[in-house]
Amino acid sequence: MVKKKVLHILRNLIIAFFGSTILVTLIYRFVPVYVTPLMIIRCMEQMKDGEEIKLKHTWVPFEKISKHLPMAVIASEDNKFATHNGFDFEAIQLAIEESQEGKRNRGASTISQQTAKNVFLWPESSWLRKGFEVYFTVLIETLWSKQRIMEVYLNSIEMGKGIYGAEATARYKFHTTAKKLSRGQCALIAATLPNPIKFDSANPSRYILRRQAKILRVMQLIPKFPPAKKGK
């Protein structure tokens, strides 16, 4: 009797989990993501450290973001974004091999995976979070378009201390709007994404300037995103 009751509760919990996560993902297909778990966590960290709370974030639609920024982050973070199904298995395999050889850890997360983590999960790495990350990546790749994934990514990614998304970065780093960001500025922003707290796109180090130059070169080689519509 007790076992049957436990199984009944477990079944209801599983149904509730899948039902709620699918519903939220469907809602976010159309509704702007105004706040993420990472934003809340960072604010709590600031409070714990006795710092003034800093949270700069303004959602803007994809059309109001510089056409160079999607290209820059693809060149920097995920060259195969437009064609993969959410996971770059070649990059994952290479990361595993390099880790086994004792080399510096290589990031293998795609833009889709980073979006799933940013919107639904917490930043600290663990096998549990990785499992949920895979699940949510599959969800957004199934329920959202590639352009929507990119739109949410560019609006939710951490781009500085207390600064999230393209519009806030444009305003507080370059004193402009996301739409008016230049090609070079977009490449600088993308260059800092591996560690936007350590690196400042507005005051780039030599290392970031080298990364910017590399990103600018790659931007010329990769296919345009989003792809031009047929007949245009």
Image (cartoon, rainbow, N blue to C red):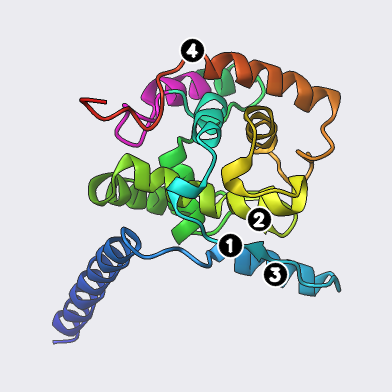
Instruction: Report the residue marked by disc 2.
Output: 168
Circle on res. 43: 3
Earlier in the chain: of badge 1 and badge 2, it is: 1
How far across and down, in percent of the image, does residue 25 sit? 31, 61
The span from disc 3 to disc 2 (Cα, nearest Å) is: 16 Å
Residue 23 versus residue 144 in the image, above or below = below
Segment tinted magenta in the rendering: 80-96
Earlier in the chain: of badge 3 and badge 2, it is: 3
Circle on res. 140: none
Instruction: Report the residue marked by disc 4.
Output: 221
Mark 3 is surrounded, within 10 Å at the Cα level, by few (under 14), some (14 to 19) or many (20 or more) other residues, namely some
Mark 4 is surrounded, within 10 Å at the Cα level, by few (under 14), some (14 to 19) or many (20 or more) other residues, namely few
The span from disc 2 to disc 4 (Cα, nearest Å) is: 28 Å
Earlier in the chain: of badge 2 and badge 4, it is: 2
Earlier in the chain: of badge 1 and badge 4, it is: 1
Residue type (three-letter) at the residue carrying disc 2 = Ala
The span from disc 3 to disc 4 (Cα, nearest Å) is: 39 Å
User: Left or right of 124: which side holds 230?
Assistant: left
Earlier in the chain: of badge 3 and badge 4, it is: 3
How far across and down, in percent of the image, does residue 4 sit? 14, 81
How far across and down, in percent of the image, does residue 173 sit? 76, 47
Instruction: Report the residue marked by disc 1.
Output: 58
Residue drawn at x 58%, y 54% as measured from the top left: 123
Look at the image and tell me in which quarter the C terminus lies: top left
Instruction: Answer whether labels 1 and 2 touch (C-beta < 8 Å).
Output: yes
Residue type (three-letter) at the residue carrying disc 1 = Thr
Residue type (three-letter) at the residue carrying disc 3 = Cys
Q: Is residue 85 magenta?
A: yes
